[in-house]
């Protein structure tokens, strides 16, 4: 089964939503409600893009996605590609989609002249941590992420 990574199209949106629900179950979180789904569509395909989505496709099926956007590093004086989510459906893992996503994201970051690429991983997600370690990614030890949610 050959996996292809490409930019998401409007026709992919329902498949991406289904994968988001699968990820929410995996992370024990609530999936997007109807209002959030509408915002997600608008922010993905509207006039002002808030982020970008890549999809992994195998045999005409969307099997994964990666959400990313750009932030800025004042110290590097360059953009940072921030990977918000990367997810591959459980039944289609080990086809190489994760590596293909990461290669494509690194290529995008370099083309955009980014100084770095960053993402966060849940501390209990051992499979993801092992995957990132094998890629040569370095776990940041000095930084603690904080969050304020606005509803």
Image: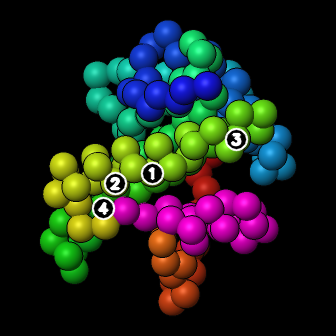
Residue at left 55%, top 35%? 65
Question: Residue 73's spot in the image, x, y percent?
Answer: 26, 70
Q: N-terminal of the two: label 4 or label 2?
A: 4
Foreground tag (4 vs 2): 2
Q: Earlier in the sequence, mark 1 or mark 4?
A: 4
Question: What's the distance in space between the residues labelled 4 and 3, CA to CA?
Answer: 27 Å
Q: How far is disc 1 from disc 3 in space, using C-alphas?
A: 14 Å
Secondary structure under tag 1 reads helix
Residue at 49%, 22% (x, y): give it: 41
Q: Which residue is mark 4?
A: 80
- Count the marks: 4
Please tell me whether mark 2 sits on a helix, a strand or a loop: helix
Callout 3 secondary element: loop
For marks 2 and 3, the one nearer the N-term is 3
> Residue 128, relative to residue 34: is it above or below?
below
Task: Give the magenta part as a residue range.
Answer: 117-135
Distance Cα–Cα, label 2 vs label 3: 20 Å
Vertical comparison of 94 with 58: above or below = below
**Could you say which disc has been placed on residue 106 in the image?**
2
Give the residue number, with chain letter if any, for mark 3.
Answer: 93
Residue denoted by label 1 = 102
- Corner quadrant of residue 61: top right
Residue 118: within the magenta?
Answer: yes
- Sequence-wise, the earlier of marks 4 and 3 is 4
Pointer 1 or 3: first along the chain? 3
- Percent from the top left, x then y, of residue 53? 44, 34
- Alpha carbon of mark 4 to alpha carbon of mark 2: how far? 11 Å
Residue 70 is at least partly visible in this image: no
Q: Quadrant of the C terminus?
A: top right
Are dots 2 and 3 in contact, CB under 8 Å?
no
SS class of the residue under badge 4?
A: strand
């Amino acid at each position: 089964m050959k996996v292809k990574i490409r930019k998401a199209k409007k026709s992919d949106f329902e498949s991406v939503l289904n994968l988001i629900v699968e990820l929410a179950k995996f992370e024990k979180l609530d999936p997007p409600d109807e209002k959030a789904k509408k915002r997600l569509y608008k922010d993905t395909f509207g006039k002002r893009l808030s982020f970008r989505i890549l999809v992994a496709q195998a045999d005409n099926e969307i099997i994964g996605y990666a959400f990313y956007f750009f932030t800025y590093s004042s110290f590097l004086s360059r953009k940072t590609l921030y990977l918000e989510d990367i997810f591959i459906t459980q039944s289609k893992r080990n086809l190489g989609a994760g590596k293909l996503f990461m290669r494509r994201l690194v290529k995008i970051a370099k083309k955009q002249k980014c100084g770095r690429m960053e993402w966060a991983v849940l501390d209990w997600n051992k499979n993801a941590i092992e995957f990132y370690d094998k890629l040569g990614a370095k776990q940041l030890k000095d930084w603690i992420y904080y969050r304020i949610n606005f509803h």
